[in-house]
Image (cartoon, helix red, strand yellow):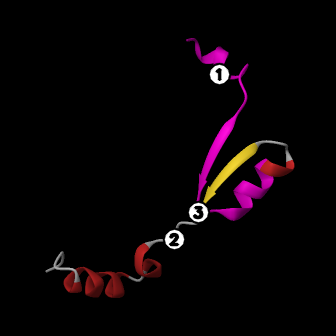
Amino acid sequence: MAVSDLFKKELKVINVGLVSFKESLEKEGFKVIHLDWRPPAGGDEEALNALKKLMGMGK
């Protein structure tokens, strides 16, 4: 399949995290599956390290 063939097919999107991106695609008429993902521990590295220790995965 040539790359140009991709633009002749229906776009199917799986969006991970950013709701505004999903909403923009839906406004344009695309079908979107949204996964509400967030970084573990809210991106707080200290909290993430504590969780890793609790799970036996950390230092």
Residue 40 located within the stretch drawn in magenta = no
Q: Residues within 10 Å of mark 1 (few under 14, many from 20)?
A: few
Stretch in magenta: 1-25
Residue 36 in picture, x, y percent from top left: 58, 66
* Residue 25 placement, left or right of 53: right
Q: Answer with the quarter of the image where residue 5 lies.
A: top right
Above or below for 31 versus 58: above
- The tag earlier along the polypeptide, 3 or 2, is 3
Q: Name the residue nearer the viewer: 56 or 45.
A: 56
The Cα atoms of the two marked residues, 2 and 1, are separated by 30 Å
Q: Residues within 10 Å of mark 2 (few under 14, many from 20)?
A: few
Dot 1 corresponds to which residue? 6
Above or below for 55 versus 27: below
Dot 3 corresponds to which residue? 17
| Residue shown at 67% from the left, 38% from the top | 12
Q: What kind of residue is marked 1?
A: Leu
The Cα atoms of the two marked residues, 1 and 3, are separated by 24 Å
Q: Name the residue at the left extreme.
A: 59
| Residue shown at 41% from the left, 75% from the top | 40
Residue 23 in picture, x, y percent from top left: 78, 57
